[in-house]
Image: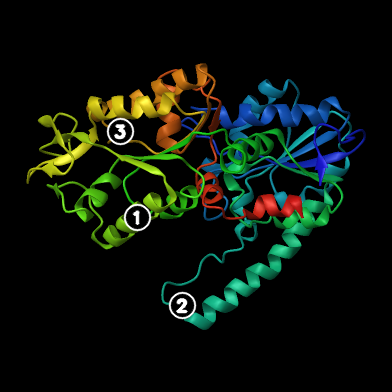
Amino acid sequence: MQNISTYDFAGKRAIVRVDFNVPLNEAFEITDDTRIRAAIPTLKKVLEKGGSLIIMSHLGRPKGPADKFSLRHIIARVEELLGTPVQFADDCQKAQQQAAALKPGDVLLLENLRFYAEEEGKPRGLAEDASEEEKKAAKAAVKESQKAFTKTLASYADCYINDAFGTAHRAHASTALIAEYFPNDKMFGYVMEGEINAIDKVLNAPQHPLTAIIGGAKVSSKIGIIEHLLDRVDNMIIGGGMVYTFRKAQGGSIGDSLFEEDQQETALRILAKAQEKGVKILLSDEVVIADAFDNNANSKIVKNNAIPDGWMGMDAAPSTVEQWKEVLLASKTILWNGPVGVFEMPNFAKGTDAIAEILAEATEKGAFTLVGGGDSVAAVTRMGYADKVSYVSTGGGAMLEYLEGIELPGIKAIRK
C-alpha cells in the first residue's frame, strides 16, 4: 500500500475510482456537486506530480446503457473544477487506445461503470420464473466475465487509487477486485483517507467522554451499530422512531407511534448491556406528538411513555434536547448518525436542527464531532454548520457498516 502524498506519479497513468454519483435534474444539470468537489484534491495531486488520470465512477442504478445515466453529462463541471480538458471514453471496455495515448496532465473519464453487469458481478435480464439452476449458471457466467472486465480496466494504468468511500462496502470490479492488479502501486485518495481517519478516531482512539447520537426510524436497522458502540462509548443518545420500541418494551404507552414488535427483546437486551458496561443511555424523555403523520397536524408535548391512542411521536421535545445538550457539551468526542424526529417535516425537524446547532457549539469548545448519514448531513448542511463540525461523512451505507466493525472490501483490498 502506497501513500498518495508521497507516491511518485511522474509519467504514470493513475486509474482513480471516484464517487461522481451526483443528482441531475431533467435538463441533466448537476444540482449538487459536493461529491465531485470532494474528489478534486486527489485528482489534482496526480496531475501536479506529473501523472495522467483515468477517472471511473458510477451514476445512478442503470440496468444497462441509458443516456440519462451517462457520465457525459458531468464532463463540463469536472473540467471547470479541475481546470483542464477532460476526454471521454464512451465504452469502459474499449478505451485502450485513449488510455495509452495519455500524456502527463491529460485526463480521461470512462463511461458509467454500472452500464456493465460485470461491475457489480450480478446477472441481468433473468426471467422472473428462472429456476435456481438458471440463476446459479447466470451468476457464475457474470462472475467469470467480471474477471476479464476488471483486467481490462487495470490494463489502462500504472497505479490505482480508490477515493470512493461511498462504495467501499461493495466488492465490485472497480472498488475491490482491480486492486489485486496493483500489488505495489495502490493507495487511498484523500476522501478515503479522511473518512477512514475520522471514523477510526471515534472507534479506536477517542477522547473521553465519547457520546454517540443514534437516530432514525427502526431499531432493526441500527442494532449492529448500537451494539458495536456500546463497547466504546460513555453515553448513547437514542432518538427518532427507535425510541418508541424501547419505551413499549419497558411497558410504556406509545399510542400510534412507530414500533417494531419483534425488536422489543433486542431493545431490552441493549439496555441491559449498557447498564452492565456502565454506558448511560438517554432516550427522549418528553416528545412532540401529533394526531396525524402530517406537517400540519395538531401537536403537543407529553412523556414518551404516556402517549395517548390516536397520537404518535414525531420529534424530541425542547426539554429533552436541553438534557442532551448538557451531556453533549461535556463530551470530548461525538458521533451523530440519524435524525431524532420526522426530519422531512419542518414542524418536526426542530429537535434534529437543534442537535446540529449543539454539535457546532461542542466543536467550537474543542470536541471532535463526526456527522454521518443522509438526514444528519442534510441537517448540518441546511443549518449552515457543515464547516463547523469536525468531519461530515458522505459514506452512507459504507459508514454504517464500518461503524458496525465490518471490514469493507474496498478498504481491505488496498490494505492487504
Residue nearer the viewer, 261 or 145: 261
Q: Secondary structure at mark 3?
A: loop
Q: Which residue is mark 1?
A: 272
Q: Please identify the quadrant where the C terminus is shown.
A: bottom right
Q: Is 268 placed above or below 365 here? A: below
**Residue at (51, 27) in percent of width and height:** 32
Residue depth check, mark 1 versus mark 3: number of the one nearer the observer: 1
Q: Is 349 placed above or below 149 here? A: above
Q: Is residue 400 left or right of residue 265?
A: right
The kind of residue tagged 2 is Ala
The residue carrying pointer 3 sits among few (fewer than 14), some (14 to 19) or many (20 or more) residues within 10 Å by Cα, namely: few
Q: Secondary structure at mark 2?
A: loop
Q: Is 362 placed above or below 291 here? A: above
Q: Which residue is mark 2?
A: 130
Identify the mark nearer the N-term, 1 or 3.
1
Question: CA–CA distance between discs 3 and 2?
Answer: 40 Å
Q: Secondary structure at mark 1?
A: helix
Name the image quarter holding residue 142. bottom right
* Residue 335, horizontal then vertical, whole percent: 48, 36
Residue nearer the viewer, 326 or 22: 326
